[in-house]
C-alpha cells in the first residue's frame, strides 16, 4: 500500500519519474469489449501537454501514449491495459542546483527524509509529470463512462482573484486557460503576465460537473461518493481543498435553505435546487455532481528563496528553467481523470448492491 | 468493498443501525501490547454523547461501550478488537411519518433507490449514530498514537457566521459548543437559540490540529497524507468541504507568499510559516497538521418541507422529535477519530519505507 | 491487513477468542434483499456444534447466533450484517498447565513470539472455535449462492486410512462422521475409538463439490478460482494440503489423459471427463468444482509430550480435558463456509467483466 | 480486483499478452535503498528462458528485462519499479488453427465465455509467458529477502513417476531438469523423450524450501503464512495441488507422531522434527518452510484431440509448433518468485505487530 495503486475493481497503478526512461500506467479491471484506440487517449494527453501556451512549461514532452497490452483488434479484452509514455526530453542536465537542496513548497524534503534517497531529476516521482499517467488512465475510464451515459466537464473557475462569472463551457476551448468565460480569461491572462514579470506564481480553483450519474452511486459509510472523490482529487499535487455543492458556504447556511426539496418529473426524482452538489448521504442523488478544488500557486518560482540543503545548511535557491506560473489550466484534465477513474470504479461496485438485479444478471 | 471497512493495516469495520439492537466496530491490525480499558474508550464516547446540552438531541443513548475481544489482562493482543454499544433507547415507535417518505437533505432516497429496501427507523445506517462506532475506534487509534507522541485536537471554529477568533484550547471544555473562544461561544449560543426558535438549523466549521507527526508520513501519489485525511473526514455525514493549511485562500495567494521556507533549529528541520498546513507533496512536513471541515446545517428541521413519498407522490413533511440544530459540537470528536484512525494506519504503513530501518528492525 | 478480513466485495471480518465474552463476524457487501433469519444461520452452526457425538469435545457452547444488524423485516438491507455468538461456557478455569507452556503442534509459540502477549485461555484466537464465525458468514454466503443456483456439498472422504468408497451424500446425515459411506464410517469409528484409547488423534481428508457455477467465475492471473479457494481453505487451522480435480495424481498423468475434451449438449459446453476438477486456467469451466483438503491429526492429545515453557525451559505436557480425536467431521461445514464466501465474492466480482452486460445492467 | 495485482505492502501488478508488444510488471511498495541492477533480474529471467534445452519451447524470447522506473543510481527509491520485457519473437503468424477453437486443458474457453473476446495469439494473457513478469518481480523480492537473511530454493522433485531420492541442491545446476538428483534426472529425461515421441506430455512436482524466516511471519486467521503461499502458488497455471510439510500424508498420521516437539538450543527455539513444514497455526515456526506443488501435464500436445469451436461445432485439433512436454523445470523459478513475493509482503506486514517494536522504530 505504498500508494501508487488506486481503485477496487477499476484499478489503476501508475509508475515513473519525471526524467526517467518513461512513465506509464496499468489499468486492471477494465471491462472487456470497449472500443479503445491510442488516439482516444492521446486526445486527452494533448489537453495537459505543456508548451502549448506561454503559461505552460516550454518542455516538449511529446507525451505520445502507446498501448502495450489489454487491447485486441480495437477492443479491450478485460486484461490489464498497460500504457506507456517515453520521456523524450531526457537529455543530461545540470541538476546541481537542486540535487542537495530542498525546494520550498516541494516534496523534495519529504522524499529524502522518508526514503533516504531521492531521484532529484526534475522532481522525480513528485513532478507534475506524474499526472500524465493519471490522464491516460482517465481517458480509458471516460470511454467506459461514456458507454453508461456519464459525462464529466471540468474547467478553470478562477485564477487568483479573477473568477469566471458567466459559465459557458464552449469558451473553454477558445482561451488557453480553459476558462468558461472569455472575458475573465483575458483578465486572468493579464494577472499571469504580471506574476511572471514578478517571477512569481498564482493559484486558482477548478470546478468539475458530472452529468448522467444514476441515483445511488457511492458506498455507505467510508466509501461515500464524495469521500472517494475527495481522496482522488486531493491526491493531485497542489490541491489544498475540495468542496461539494455549496461547500464551505453551506456552513453559513440554514437547514431550511440548504435542504434540496424533492419532486417528481416524468416519473423521475428531481430536486428544485442543488445545494448538495449531487451527493446526499454519500450517494449520487440524480442531480449534477458539482465540486471545486483549490490549487495553491506553483511552488517553483524564479525569485530568491531561503531554504536548506539535505545536510542541514542554510542556503538560497532560485529555480531556473521555465515553469508554469499557474498549474490550474493543465490540471483541468487531471481533475476530470481522477473523477472518471473514481466514478468508473464506483459504478462497477454498485452492481453488487441488490439480489434482484444480480439474479437478473446471472439468469 | 461496500464501504464499511477502512484502512489497510490498522483496519476498522463498523456496523449497526440507529435503532437496531446494537452497533459496533471491529479493529483489526491494532498492534499488541497497548494498555486499553473500556474507560479509555468511554471517555471519548462521552464527548459525543447527545443530551448533554440543550443543543444535543434529548435521546439518552447511554453509549456504554464494551470490549468483546482483542484485549487480555488490560493489553491489546494483536487480534481483532470488537467493541459494542447496545442501543438502550430502542423502544417501539411510530415511524409512519418517515417510513414511506424521503426526508430532504437525507440519505433516505439514496438508500431506497440503491438497495430497494431501507431500515427507516431513525435513519438506519445513515444516522449520525453510526459515528459512535468511529469514535470508539478512534479512541483506540489515539492510544496507539499517544505511544508515538502524536496528539490530535479538533474544535468548533465557527457556527454560522460566528467564528472563534482567539483560539484557546482550554476554553473548549468550558462551553458546550467545544469552541476555543468563550466569547464567540456565547454569541454562537444566541445564534442557535434563534435557529431553534425558528425551527431551523445552522452549519459550521471544525478545525483540527495534530502535533508530533514525524516527517514523511503519507504514501506518494494516491495515498498522500492529505488525500487520506480528505477521504476520512469527508466520509463523515454532513461534511461538504475540507481544506488544508491556507486551503481555498491559497488559491488567492502567490508562490512567493505561499511557499514555507525551511530552516534548521537544534538539528531539526523547521519552517518559518505553515501555509501548507503541515503537508507537503503528500507527506507530513514536520509542522502542525492543520485542516478545516465544513459541515452543512442539520437536515432534520421542524419546518414544513416539500418532498415525495417512495411511490413518487408529492407530500409535505415536518420532522418531529428533538434534533440537534447543529451537528458541529458533537462532530468534533468524530473528526478527531477519523484523523486518528488514518494517522495510525499511515504510521504503520510508513515502517516499510526503507531497507536500512527494516534490517535494523529484524536484526 | 492483519488477517481477520477476507474478500473484496462480499467482505467478511471475524473476531473473538475462544474463552472471551463472545465471538462474531461482520459481513459487509452482502447484497440487499436476501431473506435471512437467525435460524438459517443456526442450522449451519449446529452442524459444527461440539458435543453432539463422542468424537466431538464435550464443551456445550450453545453457539446461538444473533443477528445484530443489516437485516430488516426479514431481508438483508445491503448494510453490514453483524453476527454474534456469546461464549456460554466461559467459567473460570485453571489454565496453569498451558499458561506458560507452548503446546506442540499449536499456535501458542507463534502468537507469543509475534505479539509478545497471548490469550492462553482455550487457545484464544487460534482455537478451532474461531471457525464458528466463519460458519456463520458461510451460512449467509450460501443464501446468496442459493439465489444464483449454486450448491456446495462437502463431506469426510477419509479418516486415517479409512476412505469412503461408494459416495452417497445421503449417508452423511446418517453417521456422526459426515461420511458419505456408512460402511466406511463404521470402520472409521473403530479407528477413532482405538486412537482415543491410545490417547492419540488421527487426520483425514475432506472433499468438496460445488454444482451450478456458471462458466467464467474467477479472475485471471492472481485471483484465479482455484487460487482463491486454496487460500480460503488452507486458512482453516489443521489444513496441510489442498488439491483440485486429479490433484497430485495429475502430476503422474499424461496430457492426452489429463485434458478434458469439450463437447456440446443442448447448446451448453460440456466435458467428457473432469480431471480438471471444474477449474481451467483459473476460471470455472462449467463442470462440478471438486477439491480435497488434507487435515492433520488434532494436536491436542492426552499423551505426554516434550516441550518448552515461554521462558525457554524444557518441560512435559499432558493436555487434559476432552478434545476431538479428529477435527474432520466438524470441519466439513467450515470447508463449505470458506468455499461459499469465496464463491459469493467471485460471483459479484465477475459482474464487472464485460461492457455489454454492464450497459444492460444500467439501462 | 480483476486479479492482476497481488500483495498488500509489497504489491505486484503484472500485464501483457504472450504475443503483444511487451509484457511487464510494476512493483509498488518495495522499500528504498536496495541495490538493484538489471542483471540481478536478468539472472532469474534466464532460469525460465525457453529454448535452453530440448525440453523447452524453441521460441527465442530473449526476455531482456529493462528497468523503467523506481531505481536511481543503482538503488531502489521507494517508488514503483516498472520492469518491461519486449516480445521479440512477435512475427505475424497463422493462428487459424486456434483462433476459433477451444484447446482442451486451456483457458481459451473460459476467457471467451467470460469476456466475449479473446486475444488468441499464443494464448494471450493465459500463456505461460505471463509468468516471466512474476519471475522479474520475484527477483526484486529476493533482493529484499536476502537483506533479511531469507533464502528460497525450489527444485524438481518428480517428473511423472520418477522422483528425486537423494536431494543434493548442487545437482540442480548440473542437469536441465533442475532435479537435485542426477541419476533421477537421467531417468526423467528418458521418460520425457518417450513422451515427446508419443506426442504426449507429463506432469511433475516441485518442492520449495525456505531458510532463515524469523518466527511469527504470517497473519492470523485468513492471511496465514500457508494460506498466502497456497494462493500464490496455486495461481501459477498448471498447478493442481499444494501441500505443506507432511501434507496429505499428515492425514494418515497420528497426533503423537505429527506434533513436532519443541526444545531450546543456544537460546533459540527448535523442533526435533518438521512434520509441520515450518508453519504452525499460520505463523512461521522457525524451521525450514517446506511445501510441494503438483503440476499437471502440459495441455498443449501434438496428438489429435476432440474439442469444439467457439460457435459450438465439434472439431478436432492438433497443436502444432514445439511445446514443452513438461512445464516443471521452467516453473521452478516461478514457484520461487511467488514464494519470494509473498514472504516479502508478509515480512513487511509483520512489522506492525507490536507496540514495543513500533515505538523503538519511531524513537
Image: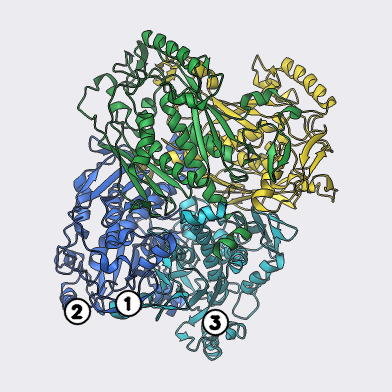
Chain colours: A blue, B cyan, C yellow, D green
- The mark closer to the camera, 2 or 1, is 1
Q: How many marks?
A: 3
Could you tell me residue D46's position as x and y percent?
35, 32
Residue furthest bottom in the image: B183
Q: Is residue D111 visible?
A: no
Between A253 and C320, the residue placed more toward the observer is C320
Left or right: D71 in relation to B298: left
Give the number of the disc on residue B196.
3
Q: Are marks 2 and 1 on the same chain?
A: yes
C-alpha distance separating marks 2 and 1:
30 Å
Q: Find disc 1 in the rendering and name its residue.
A: A315
Dividing the picture into quadrants, the one containing residue C61 is top right
What is the secondary structure assignment of the residue under circle 1? Answer: strand
Between D307 and C120, the residue placed more toward the observer is C120
Q: Find disc 2 in the rendering and name its residue.
A: A191
Q: Is residue B194 above or below residue A97?
A: below
Q: Is residue B132 visible?
A: yes
Q: Are marks 2 and 3 in contact (CB under 8 Å)?
A: no
Left or right: C3 in relation to A96: right
- The mark closer to the camera, 2 or 3, is 2
Number of other residues with Cα within 10 Å of mark 3, as a class: few under 14, some 14 to 19, many 20 or more: some
Amino acid at each position: 500500500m505504498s500508494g501508487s495503486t488506486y481503485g477496487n475493481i477499476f484499478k489503476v497503478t501508475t509508475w515513473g519519474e519525471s526524467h526517467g526512461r518513461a512513465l506509464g500506467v496499468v489499468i486492471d479491471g477494465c471491462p472487456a469489449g470497449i472500443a479503445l484506440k491510442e488516439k482516444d487517449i492521446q486526445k486527452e494527453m494533448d489537453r495537459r501537454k505543456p508548451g502549448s501556451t506561454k503559461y505552460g512549461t516550454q518542455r516538449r514532452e511529446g507525451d505520445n501514449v502507446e498501448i502495450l497490452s489489454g487491447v485486441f483488434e480495437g477492443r479491450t479484452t478485460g486484461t490489464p491495459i498497460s500504457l506507456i509514455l517515453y520521456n523524450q526530453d531526457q537529455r543530461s542536465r545540470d541538476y546541481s542546483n537542486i540535487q542537495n537542496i530542498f525546494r520550498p513548497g516541494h516534496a523534495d524534503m519529504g522524499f529524502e527524509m522518508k526514503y533516504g534517497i531521492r531521484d532529484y531529476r526534475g522532481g522525480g516521482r513528485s513532478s507534475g509529470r506524474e499526472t500524465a499517467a493519471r490522464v491516460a488512465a482517465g481517458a480509458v475510464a471516460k470511454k467506459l463512462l461514456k458507454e453508461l451515459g456519464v459525462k464529466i466537464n471540468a474547467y478553470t473557475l478562477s485564477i487568483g482573484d479573477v473568477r469566471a462569472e458567466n459559465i459557458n463551457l464552449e469558451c473553454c476551448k477558445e482561451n488557453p486557460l480553459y476558462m468558461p468565460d472569455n472575458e475573465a480569461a483575458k483578465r486572468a491572462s493579464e494577472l499571469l503576465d504580471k506574476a511572471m514579470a514578478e517571477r512569481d506564481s498564482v493559484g486558482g480553483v477548478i470546478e468539475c460537473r458530472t452529468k448522467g450519474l444514476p441515483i445511488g452511486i457511492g458506498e455507505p459509510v467510508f466509501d461515500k461518493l464524495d469521500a472517494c472523490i475527495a481522496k482522488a482529487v486531493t491526491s493531485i499535487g497542489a490541491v489544498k481543498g475540495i468542496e461539494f455543492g455549496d461547500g464551505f458556504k453551506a456552513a453559513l447556511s440554514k437547514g431550511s435553505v440548504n435542504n434540496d426539496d424533492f419532486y417528481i418529473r416524468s416519473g423521475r426524482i428531481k430536486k428544485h435546487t442543488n445545494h448538495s452538489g449531487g451527493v446526499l448521504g454519500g450517494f449520487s442523488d440524480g442531480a449534477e455532481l458539482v465540486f471545486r478544488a483549490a490549487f495553491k500557486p506553483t511552488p517553483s518560482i524564479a525569485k530568491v528563496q531561503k531554504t536548506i540543503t539535505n545536510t542541514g545548511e542554510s542556503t538560497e535557491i532560485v529555480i531556473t528553467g521555465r515553469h508554469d506560473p499557474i498549474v490550474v489550466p493543465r490540471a483541468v484534465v487531471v481533475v476530470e481523470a481522477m473523477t472518471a477513474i473514481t466514478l468508473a470504479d464506483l459504478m462497477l461496485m454498485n452492481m453488487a448492491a441488490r439480489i434482484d438485479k444480480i439474479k437478473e444478471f446471472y439468469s
